[in-house]
Amino acid sequence: MTHRSITTFAKRTGRRSAALLGASLLTVAALGAAAPFGTDTAFAQDDEQQPAEGRQFSAAAGEKVAEAQEVMETNPQQAVNILNGLISSDTPLNPYEKSIIYQMLGQTYSDLKNTSQSLRSFEAAISSGGLLPKDEDTIKVIIAQLMIMNEQYTEGAERLEQYLREGLREEPSHVDLLVNAWTQAENYKRALPWAEKWFNQANPKERKHFDLLNFIYNNLGMTGKQADIVKEMIQKWPEDNTLWNSWASMLGNGGREEDAFEVNKMLYLGGALTTEDDIKKVIQYYSFYEMPYQAAQILEREMSNGRIARTAENLEELSKYYRTAREYDKAIPVLEEAARSSNSAKLYAALGEAYYNEGNCEKAQESFGNAISRGYDAGKSWMQVANCIYDSTQNAERLTCDMTPEEMDNAPITRIRARAIEAFRKVPSGSRESRNARKWIQFVSDERSAVERRCEFEKNVEKELCFSKIKLAYDNLVFAGGDFNLDDESCARFKDEYDSLYVRTTTG
């Protein structure tokens, strides 16, 4: 139950309390009209009670009470003055007379909206000693009612509960009062047994009965009982989407997210969800359960039919779902629209990242440039651009050892590396990315040197092997009849170098 519903309930219960109070006090008011005041007039407060000794008005007191009675409705303040004057006068009053006068004061103060004085007057009526037990019980209930109506919820409810424990017969009106008082006091634990009794006694049960129990169970965290009451409500009012949403929420809060998803999905597919917030909730469930493409499809469809606004924020969300689904070709046009409509640095950066994931480094650089000009982090942007350029070396032909230095200089991979280094150098020195940029520059620069070192190493290994083979050919001259026979012809290019280092030449 919403706060507004509770307030409405309280107002209705308050009106019932006022009506009950008025009915009780009318009995007091009717006494003076039943018969003229006289020395032998007895004021019976119950038809079954007979006049008893001391339960009658004197002529002096009766005259003043009758005078107050006549003006109670037309001039209640005058009635108060008359009755207070009688109380403070020298006129001797017996307990019965005091009890009636104080009851009349209690009613009149209540009519004047002076609740504190009304309470004091009814308390004085009890203290007077002139009430019969049944009449005293009635006044006690009136006191509890007045406290509750005066927003003394806890005091009034505790009074009424005490009277019930002491033997007061419980009435439906008492249950109404206690439910209202404890709920208004936000003491839901104390309200619970009365609310359940109020619910069980109701026939027929109306929506307000279900709403109140739902509200109290929710505030007490009694998810099991709340689930039961909401299920019963859904059966009665299946067209109420708030109940279905509440049911789905309880499933989710109870750790049954998949069941909550199924409920929301059923409502959406059945056409019950029509507001943007409700539909977005379903979309978020699809995303949460790793179905980003389906989430994107629903969001795009709902933006097309106008049930979800085509704002930059929603376009960004759509793009995010497509990117998560690796549908970059679908994400990019959406991001372009979002960036143009919002002129947002963040969205231009997101567009640059999407182009980066597509390997379109030129478009990525253009988009990150737009982001930087709108205040986006330049260091982060140029790192993305540089990484995009460098990643494209993966598709370029590698440098090989049979290339000449000129061929290596003009190779596509060398030119790509140079562009990447240039982009890394554009990372501002004051950026948090500057240290990483310097490391990347060193790494990319060292790649060419590493190739050259490897080629030199391989060449040296080959030469050493050929030197061994050439030496072996010289050693075999005596067996080869004076002929120099080299088994590996590829080593012939190293013979002159070997001879210059290791073979002595003689001249005749």
Image (cartoon, rainbow, N blue to C red):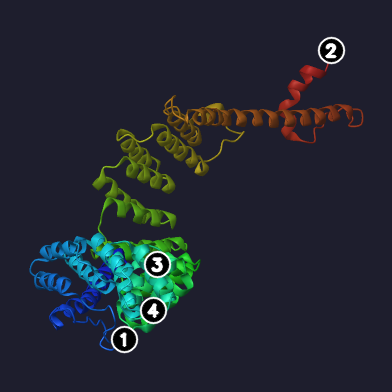
Across and down, in percent, residue 27 comes to 21, 79
Across and down, in percent, residue 203 comes to 33, 86
- Which residue sits furthest bottom? 48
Q: Is residue 507 above or below residue 247?
A: above
Q: Amino acid at mark 1?
A: Pro
Q: Amino acid at mark 3?
A: Glu
Whether residue 233 is visible: yes
Q: How many marks?
A: 4
Read off the residue under disc 3. Answer: 158
Q: CA distance from mark 1 to mark 2?
A: 131 Å
Counting residues from the start of the chain, the first of labels 4 and 1 encountered is 4
Q: Is residue 133 left or right of residue 106?
A: right
Read off the residue under disc 1. Answer: 204
Q: Amino acid at mark 2?
A: Thr
Secondary structure state at the residue bearing disc 4: loop
Whether residue 297 is visible: no
Q: Is the residue marked by circle 2 packed among few (<14), some (14-19), or many (20+) residues within 10 Å?
A: few
Q: Is residue 202 left or right of residue 442?
A: left
Secondary structure state at the residue bearing disc 3: helix
Read off the residue under disc 4. Answer: 168
Q: Is residue 181 left or right of residue 394?
A: left
Counting residues from the start of the chain, the first of labels 1 and 3 encountered is 3
Secondary structure state at the residue bearing disc 1: loop
Q: Is the residue marked by circle 1 packed among few (<14), some (14-19), or many (20+) residues within 10 Å?
A: few
Label 4 or label 1, whichever lies nearer to me, is: 4
Q: CA distance from mark 1 to mark 3?
A: 29 Å
